[in-house]
Image: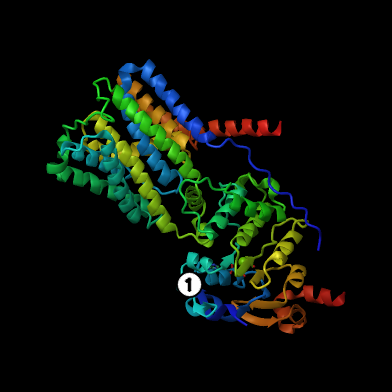
Amino acid sequence: MSEIVVTHVPHKRSIPFGQEAVGALSIIALGAIGYFLYPDDLAFLTRLIGIAFLVLSLDLVTGYCGVATLGHAAQFGVGAYAAGIACVRGITDPVALLAVGVFAGTIMGLISGALITRFRGLPQLVLSIAVGQLVAALANKLSWLTGGSDGLSGITPGKVFGIFNFDMYSRTAFLFSLGVLVIVFVLLQRFVRSPFGLMCRGIKDDDLRARMIGVSIYPRLVVMYGVAGAVAGIGGALTAISTGVVGLDSVSFERSAEVLVMLVLGGAGHLWGALAGTVIFMIFEHIVAAANPFHWMTLVGLLLILIVVFAPRGLIEPVLSLASRFKRKGEAA
Amino acid sequence: MTNLLEARGVSCSFGGLHVTRDVNFKLTAGDRVALIGPNGAGKTTLVNLITGDIAPSEGQFFMGGDEITGLSIPDRVRRGLVRTFQTTRLFANLTVADNVALAIMQRKRITRRFFSSSTELPEVRAEWSEILSHLGLAKLAYRKVVELAYGQQRLIELAIGLALHPKVLLLDEPAAGVPHDEAPKILEAINRLPSDIAVLMIEHDMDLVFKFARRVLVLAAGRLIFEGSPDEVTADHEVRRAYLGSYADARRAT
Ligand SMILES: Nc1ncnc2c1ncn2[C@@H]1O[C@H](COP(=O)(O)OP(=O)(O)OP(=O)(O)O)[C@@H](O)[C@H]1O
Ligand SMILES: [Mg+2]
């Protein structure tokens, strides 16, 4: 037998928790820019953060697992309604309301996931729309609970940690949302690199290969949907808390479609892509809609076409490949 | 001796085309079996049937006395039934290390962990690092699979198979597409496997068959037409006519 020269793979040099630190600091820095430079737009920026949770949540199932869905607003809306209803009925502590949103979102995610991930391809997409529409119809019909088409109003949460009041400039709401985003984003960064998260990416790449290494796919996807539901539920609850109302738009088909657009815009399969897509789309919409309320959708359409043509894998992809090229150069030097 | 895998009267047809006809065979501990036959004989289909990718229209499979015919693919894998694919099926957008690490982590039942970082877990890392080193893939560990040459991807198929610690390993033309100077690594890897597992290799290259197999099964038009030692196979008139043709003659002449 020939002599085997075993050259083991050198360890990757990386700072422990480096990525998480970069993630947290970047979000805090961006938040600080918003807070200090645009103090009049904090209500809008708070809404943006709420939607960012939904796009992150969608990224988990679509970007990381390859599930096609146009009904993802259901998770967000259920979280929003649950937190809103709880608040109206007397649970006013913001952190407790977040927990209510997480709980409701998780349940909704598990139910949706159990239905939707049984199928693949077009049937899956259609089913996701059906689930979304069902939730929207329920929100409309159960008007004694949800306020129906008038929306649920009168949500007046108490002080954050019993200290900070929600003010009319949305300062507290913004900082509270930003803080939750930092925590959730860091947890998600670890989650998507965990064995579970890696396996989900494997399933997305080739599910037969995944089964051939012994993975039962369905339970994995349902669990992932549960996690995604929790994240979306947080976004819903935050939006309910900070805006004081929950409307049918939060469970609408348009919302589901819009967040899919944001995800594709930023780059599905990256947490940064989800964030970038949300920020760019929402700010673009905010500015253009104010400047030209009649044609802003046309402009959004044009922007999208340009991006799909020139950066089909999302805006984050060129940035990431540039970063990795730098890194490789650094390692070679 | 215990039967690690047994096929009893297995048949399968695709819309009237009988691709597998009444196939019976046993694999026992320590078996090193080559499955040969002309293109389209139904070799890959037989592997698909064994692993549960497609269901037979008739017949049963057993592992160590338990029937596995109705089991799902992952259930069979968990019993140690592992295959590689003829046309590679890998996690194309993951790194080579991640591909192998996923197999290891699945085997160790740690893919349900949510917050530990995955590929660099020490006990996982030591294993994939060793497997990749043996196959000459160490330098490529952190490259994405899509970026690699086809021959290198073929070796990753094998790496994943090895990482699952199979009891029965089915290799579907593992050497096809692998550059000539890399090919010996495949046999070396198989030779390093525990001696009590069964390996079945589909292979067209008769030199490799001779080096690897102690027993050869010949499949033609979906039927097992011959079973014997490599020398018996090349000597057999019918096999020569069905498949080997000039190869057997050439071998005899030397
Ligand atoms: N899913 C399928 N549907 C219909 N026909 C199929 C299917 N899979 C295989 N076949 C047919 O079954 C026959 C056997 O195919 P198979 O791939 O098992 O042959 P093989 O012995 O592995 O050939 P090769 O040496 O080329 O790999 C072929 O005629 C093929 O066209
Ligand atoms: Mg074949």
Residue name at image x 60 percent, y 66 percent: B166
Q: Is mark 1 within 8 Å of ligand 1?
A: no
In percent of width and height, residue A306 lies at 46, 30
The amino acid sitting under disc 1 is Ala
In percent of width and height, residue B230 lies at 75, 78
Relative height, residue A126 to residue B40 (above, below): above
Residue A127 seen: no
Front residue of this view, candidates A88 and B38: A88
In percent of width and height, residue A27 lies at 44, 28
**Image quarter (top left, top right, bottom left or bottom right) of the C terminus of chain A:** top right
Residue B185 seen: yes
Looking at the rendered structure, the secondary structure element under dot 1 is: loop
Relative height, residue A202 to residue A275 (above, below): below
Front residue of this view, candidates B168 and B12: B168
Residue name at image x 36 percent, y 49 percent: A226
**Image quarter (top left, top right, bottom left or bottom right) of the N terminus of chain A:** bottom right
**Residue B212 quadrant:** bottom right
Toward the right, the furthest residue is: B254
The residue at which mark 1 appears reads as B55
How packed mark 1 is, by other alpha carbons closer than 10 Å (few <14, some 14-19, many 20 or more), is some
Toward the front, the furthest residue is: A162
In percent of width and height, residue A307 lies at 46, 32
Residue name at image x 77 percent, y 82 percent: B235
- Subunit ID for the residue under disc 1: B
On the picture, is A317 further left or further right than A152?
right
